[in-house]
Image: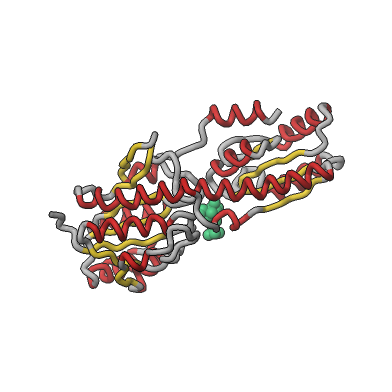
Amino acid sequence: MTKIKKIAVFTSGGDAPGMNAAVRAVVRTAAYHKIQTFAVYRGYDGMIKGDIKRINTGDVGNIIQRGGTILKTARSESFRTKEGRAIAYENLKKFEIDACVAIGGDGTFTGAEVFHKEYNIPFIGIPGTIDNDIYGTDYTIGFDTAINTAIEAIDKIRDTADSHSRLFFVEVMGRHSGYIALHTGISSGAGCIFLPETNTSIEDLITILHKAHKRKKLFNMVVVAEGNQNGGAMEIAKKLKEKYTEYESKVTIIGHMQRGGAPSCSDRMLASRLGYHAILELIAGKVNVALGIVSDELCITPFKDAITQTKQPKASLIEMANILSM
Ligand code: F6P
């Protein structure tokens, strides 16, 4: 018999398609093991405000297919303060919460790690972010849906780019991580991809464009991660124009569209597996760890590693992208 009787579940940071499927799996697996679940609304902010309510198996019906998060989310500034965390702890005590399941990215896990150290509340983390930048899992919840949304948009832009023989810059999300840009760049046949992790220059781009011109390629697609060192797509287009007036280009920023929409089948599967295992691992006594799936197997990573180790797009994939874009 588990000692855990009551848990809290919350989503935090940028929302990601599939977070609802994870919440559903947590609530239903907990109920199966006679554990009561409480929903904390708007992440750590809600924990501080005491926005905590009992959530039952029926409450998570008809949400597996929905994007966003029914628990709402926030990037909490107050939880970064000792005072904020002290209030959050009092609120969890009021509801006699024995453990928490936190669904979010590295900011969420960092908060959990600090909180656990101060108040010894057991936490299990589920990686939910479209950025796919969490160490200890091949993919994060939301990434697959986001890249498919981006690809759909880029394919449409490609049609008009081809028709008008134009150069297009398409900006995708990823302030610090190039996963979305790399995967959508490769899959959309982009001529060049700007990632935060590489130092592709405007001169490199010009070389690529000149080569393409020689091959009589009249249109080109360039995928840019928003956190690229040259700036976003607007900035790169401007810098190119300053150096080479001959290059007329158009810019599309896909933006937050990438964060919404119904989760893909892969994201629903990943979220269901991780939500289910979060409860099993809590019952087994695991605390302060993030769950992930690596090579189709459950992977358990201490928060301290999940937040300090960086996961970067594979160099071999970047090399492949360069070769295929020729
Ligand atoms: O959730 C991840 C992410 O979408 C990043 O790709 C992006 O840089 C950031 O969040 C945007 O955050 P916000 O919506 O808070 O501006």
Left of 220 or right of it: where is 112? left
Q: Which quarter shows the N terminus?
A: bottom left
Residue 247 occupies quadrant: top right
Going 37% across and 52% down the picture, which residue do you hit? 109
In the rendered view, tell whether residue 237 sits above or below residue 86: above
Q: Quadrant of residue 293?
A: top left
Residue at horizontal 30 percent and vertical 44 percent from the top: 302
Q: Position of residue 24 (x, y in %)?
A: 36, 59
Quarter containing the C terminus: top right
Q: Quadrant of residue 180?
A: top right
Query: Does any portion of residue 242 appear in the rendered image?
Result: no
Instruction: Tell me residue 9's x, y (percent).
Output: 33, 61
Quadrant position of ligand 1: bottom right
In depth, the one of 198 and 69 nearer the eye is 69
Position of residue 143 in the picture relative to residue 225 (left or right): left
Query: Is any atom of residue 302 visible in this view?
Result: yes
Q: Residue at x 78, y 28 (%)?
A: 211
Q: Nearer the viewer, residue 176 or 274?
A: 274
